[in-house]
Image (spheres, rainbow, N blue to C red):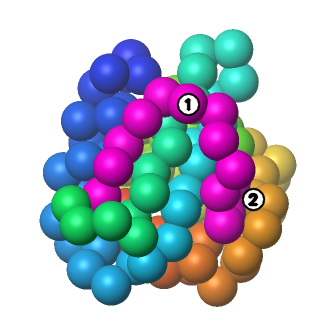
Amino acid sequence: MSLETASGTIREKLGYAAGLDASVKFDFGDEGVIHVDARQNPPVLTHEDAEADVVLSCSLETFENILSGAQDPNIAFMFGKLKIQGNMKLAMKLNAILEV
């Protein structure tokens, strides 16, 4: 999965994120970041490394597996494949949005 493909998928999933009212950063290390400002309508997606309410860090491969259902995000977190910084309640909401 490329950063552009991940961006498209996240943009699509944001259709299920009504009322999220937060900023989220997906950090894929050397492969780049995706920053989503869902406080705006429609949400604004960029590749800027900006501050966010919650940051999810993983490889693009792990992210692809989470989106496809091949990897449970909770298990990925427990095994250190997914790291979360910031608002854990928001991270749990994102879990539900990404699984749709």
**Residue at 58% in and 21% down:** 32
Answer with the quarter of the image where residue 5 lies: top left
**Residue at 64% in and 85% down:** 89
| Label 2 neighbour load within 10 Å: few <14, some 14-19, many 20+ | some
**Image depth: mark 2 or mark 1 in front:** 1
Q: Which residue is more in the foreground, 69 or 23?
A: 23
* Secondary structure type for disc 2: strand
Left/right placement of residue 64 relative to residue 29 reads: left
The type of residue carrying mark 2 is Ile
Instruction: Count up the numbered dots.
Output: 2
Tell me: residue 69, above or below residue 3. Answer: below
Q: What segment carries the magenta color?
A: 43-56
Write down the residue under mark 2.
84
* Secondary structure type for disc 1: loop
The type of residue carrying mark 1 is Glu
- For the C terminus, the image quarter is bottom left
Write down the residue under mark 1.
48
Left/right placement of residue 24 relative to residue 8 reads: right
**Residue at 71% in and 78% down:** 88
**Residue at 32% in and 21% down:** 4
Answer with the quarter of the image where residue 1 lies: top left
Cβ–Cβ under 8 Å for marks 2 and 1? no
Viewer can see residue 60 = yes
Magenta-span inclusion, residue 52: yes
Q: Which residue is more in the foreground, 7 or 37?
A: 37
Residue 59 lies, in percent from the top left, at: 62, 30
Residue 16 lies, in percent from the top left, at: 22, 72
